[in-house]
Amino acid sequence: MHRLAVMGGGSLGLLLAGKLAAAGLPAELWTRTEEQAARIAESGLTLEERDGSVAVRRIEAVPFEEVTPGFDGIVLIALKQTSMDGRLLRTLGRKLGMNAGTVLFQNGIGHVERVSGALPGRRLLAAVTTEAALRSGPSSVRHTGSGETWIGEWEPLSAASDKNGMADLISGVEQALKKAGFSASVSNEIRERMLRKLLINAVVNPLTALWRVPNGELTATPERRLAMDALFRETAGVLRQNGLHGAKDSELWEDVLRVCRATAANRSSMLQDVTAGRETEIDALNGAVCRMAAASGRDAPWNAAVTALVKAIQSPKERGV
Ligand code: PAF
């Protein structure tokens, strides 16, 4: 059995860690702060399941800076893109041994290339999940929505790649997630899955953050639906020029509406960031759409507008300027 580590003590990280621990898997949690690791060491990790049951799970929590170099297990990286700066990636490169496998759970696009550049020679998978969770404190999390998780290789294997090692990593991750109770499957089209998730996030996240509404209220008025539709159409058009090919626009629009219904009472991750005064993922979502549009010589005015508006919500103090 592979050793497992979850990196990141936010909503998704705590959910993954709590459920892996509940399934008796050899998992540890790497936190960004010493305070969070100490709190979890002291009081355990409280996980509220979908059925309302609450259990405290014991899990080893280690501040990331103190992880012993040479970790050769599987790391599920559940940090936001905003946390994955050059310094963190350089430290990660020192912490992981050459046999380590890494699974990237970030929203948006662009992170896989950045991480693979920082971890040369290591096996890397991308993951897309529609699980929803809400962190209610440094050591407690509520599983607010069951979804699907897909894992897959970013690039097709080159002839020189370690096919056996990659197959072992994929099956290790799939089995661990399934044992922890997640609906997990392997995707041969993970980029397509990421682009479809990006489309959902690019519509739901900025609008919920700007209007301060839960996901289910996005469709509540004709005016809101009009703005959603315009942002959707523009984003879908840009993503189609960048590899999104598998589904018709009507199916993609239905995906967006399905997420709004399935997570109706949830506050999107961007709304949570905005209300907590944290930096948002806007640059990795709508900002990335603007960059893709510019690279193909087109404008993306709706994406540019929501990017500017979400950035402007933060006060100068929160933005560190
Ligand atoms: O970022 C989020 O909050 C989620 O990815 C989603 C799907 C928008 C649901 O809240």
Image (cartoon, rainbow, N blue to C red):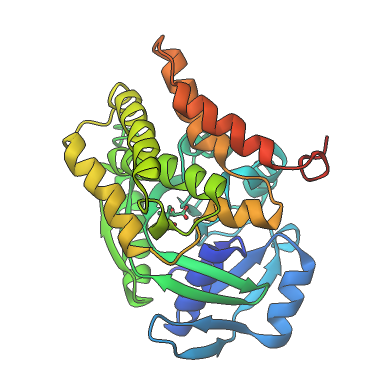
Residue 103: % across, % down: 45, 53
Position of residue 305 relative to residue 201, above or below, is: above
- Quadrant of ligand 1 in image: bottom left
- The percent position of residue 229, horizontal first and vertical second, equals 32, 36
Res 17 visible:
yes
Tell me what residue is drawn at x 64 percent, y 85 percent: 44
- Left or right of 305, for residue 34: right
| Residue plotted at (30% across, 25% down) | 237
The relative height of residue 2 versus residue 318 in the rendered view (above or below) is below
Task: Return the residue nearer the eye: 252 or 38.
Answer: 252
Measuring from the top left, give residue 7's x and y in whole percent: 59, 60
Q: What number of labels is visible?
A: 0
> Does the rendering let one see residue 26?
no
- Quarter of the image with the N terminus in it: bottom left
Q: Up-down: is 287 above or below 23? A: above
Return the residue found at the far front: 222
- Residue sitting nearer the eye, 90 or 278: 278
Asked if residue 84 lies left or right of residue 152, the reply is right
Tell me the quadrant of the picture where the C terminus can be found. top right
Place of residue 138 in the rendered image (x, y in percent of width and height, measured from the top left): 68, 72
Rendered image quadrant of residue 302: top left
Image point (55%, 65%), residue name: 11
